[in-house]
Structures are given as structure tokens and as C-alpha cells.
Amino acid sequence: MVSLPFQRSIGEEYEKTILLSIVGRGYCAGKVFAPICAHAISDTLYVTSSTRPQRNGTVFEYTPTGVQSTFATLQSRPRGLAFDSSGNLFVATNDFNDHGTIHKFTPNGTQSNFGGASGFMQGLAVDSFGNVFVTGGVGFTPDIIKFTPDGTRSIFASGLGQGFGLAFDSAGNLFAADAVNQTIFEYTPGGTQSTFVGPAAFGPNGGPIGLAFDSSGNLFVSAVGTPAGDTILEFTPGGTESTFATGLNNPRGIAFDSLGNLFVAEFNFPPSGDILEFTPGGTESVFARGNIRPAWLTFGPARGPAGANVPDSGSTFAILCIALVALESVRRKLAITPKSARGAL
């Protein structure tokens, strides 16, 4: 039971008690409901991890407060993952013969094999049309492979030295990290390639790994082996470079939450595999201590374990939050309406 205070325009305070049916992992409350609700609905962190010697894989789920649970257990090494606009989660995995498979998890937890290809898969991204892109191919992931929503496979681009992270900007251009060629390539939706930044951005021994755009269109890059060590670099849309964070240890996947905080996976075996959190101003903290080997990250709606076939708790939160926003609207109306006129509400 949650008690929410209401105040009349004449200054008299009273309380109305509202019974909330708590379904899933929590509820939204506060003076400004919309941003809080958006954070609770969309800011569940999903992380791929694999262990040795079995190299089994797991997709872990973290609440905004850092509570860890297992979303899915996979029999091969998982890497990149991303949601489409319908709430389906796609996860790239790799068997011992370096054959890659993309697994699809629907909002109700149903798992299926979406597509596959020879070679080791790394970064994965989904465009606004629901096409899935993944770095893969035989050798050091030289290709960018495209899967349409029905699973049809084609080669979108080839010739990478070693492909890692993928990310789309707001205009639908695809950016790809090539660690061997020390380059971030940019591709138009039609596949035309250009160089966004080259080796000079990373020094003689450095290279880009993970990619993520912030809400202002700046590209953040996890980079290893730069003159400043393992770092997070920031590039403006025009390519101007600055250093956002230093002193990291083998950073790989990166992702932003809805509040603009940057999360970074340090791809190390326990106890060194931390997930770091950086505020927009650059203040660093440890979001999750190294009890897993985190690889790639993405944010999405809260879910139960895969295969549980339970309603999407994100939808439950959304309905609840809409109700709370409506309640806040009534409160504001009461506050500005003359007492004599309130009977008409």
C-alpha cells in the first residue's frame, strides 16, 4: 500500500491512499512520474558472459539498482545483443567450430534460432526497420552480415580486419569498429562506406572495440592499447576526439541508459570483470563487481527468465505509470480549481 500526499489550493493537506497491485519487480512513484517511469521500464541492463573451460554462456539481467538475475543460459559463447523496436532481444552466440547463431527472445520469453553464419560473431545492432546486423565471417570477423526481419541473410559489407562493435546513429548510418585496421567505418543505409576516424585516433597500438551513441549524437568508443591505456574516447558528429575516461581494464561493450549514464563491461575473468558506470559528467563508479565475465551490454524492458512465458513486466509498468501520470493531472487540476467548482470534476 502506497500513500500519496495531495495538497489543496487553500493549503490544507490531506492524503488519499491508493492500493497499487505490484506486479513484476516494482512500481514507479514520485512528483515527476514520467521520467521515473521511463527509467524503470527501459533501464534493465542485459549482459552477455561466458566462462572457461566449458565456455558456456549466460545472459544476465540487472535492475536499475544493480540486482542481478539470470535471463537465459546458452550452450555457446554469447557476444553482441540488442533489442528491436518490438521488444525482441537478439543475442549472437558462437560454438566451438566458430559457427555463429543469433538467438531471438520474444517479449513473452519464447526463444528461437533466428539465423546463423560461418565464423565468429561479435557486435550486434538492430536498425529501425528491424534488420539485424552482426560482425562475423570466417577468420577475424571480416564481414558485416545483415538479417532481414524474416531471417534472410546477406553480406552488408566485407573487408574488415577484425570487426567488433556496431552502432546506428539517429540518421540510420551504421558505424563499425575495426580493431586490426584501427578504424571506425561509417556505412549509409545503402551500404556506402567511408572512414569516420582512422588509426591516428588510437595511436600506434590501439584500436576501437565497443560503440555507443549518446542522445546528442556523440559517439563513445571503448578502446584498448591507446597511448593513454585502455580508455573511453568521445567523438563529436564531426569527428573531433576527446578522452572521456582512462584507467580501464580491457573494456568491451558499452551502452547508455535513458538518463545518459554510460555503462562499460570490462571483459575479464572473475574477480576482475566489473561493469562500470559513468555519469554524463564522467564520475566513475562500479555498478556490478566482477563475479561474471561481462562482454556486451544493452538496455531494455524488464523481463522474467527466458522461457517462463510470463507477461512482459515492462508493459505492466507502462500501464501503471500512465495511471500515475493521470492521477498527477487530477491532483494539479484540484490544486487550481476553486473549491465550489470541484463537484463538477
Image: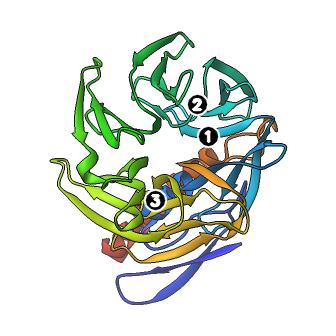
The quarter of the displayed image where residue 10 is located:
bottom left
Residue 143's disc number: none
**Contact? badges 2 and 1 (CB < 8 Å):** yes
Tell me which colouring the rendered structure shows: rainbow
Above or below, 63 against 303 in this view is below
- Counting from the top left corner in percent of width and height, residue 126 is at 46, 31
SS class of the residue under badge 3? helix
Mark 2 Cα shell of 10 Å, populated few (<14), some (14-19), many (≥20): many
Q: Would you name the residue on which mark 2 appears?
A: 121
- Counting from the top left corner in percent of width and height, residue 154 is at 47, 11
Mark 3 Cα shell of 10 Å, populated few (<14), some (14-19), many (≥20): some
The quarter of the displayed image where residue 291 is located:
bottom right
**CA separation in Å, label 2 and label 3:** 43 Å
Q: Residue furthest right?
A: 54
Q: Would you name the residue on which mark 1 appears?
A: 79
**Residue 24 located left or right of residue 223:** right
Note whether residue 149 is visible: yes
Q: Would you name the residue on which mark 3 appears?
A: 325
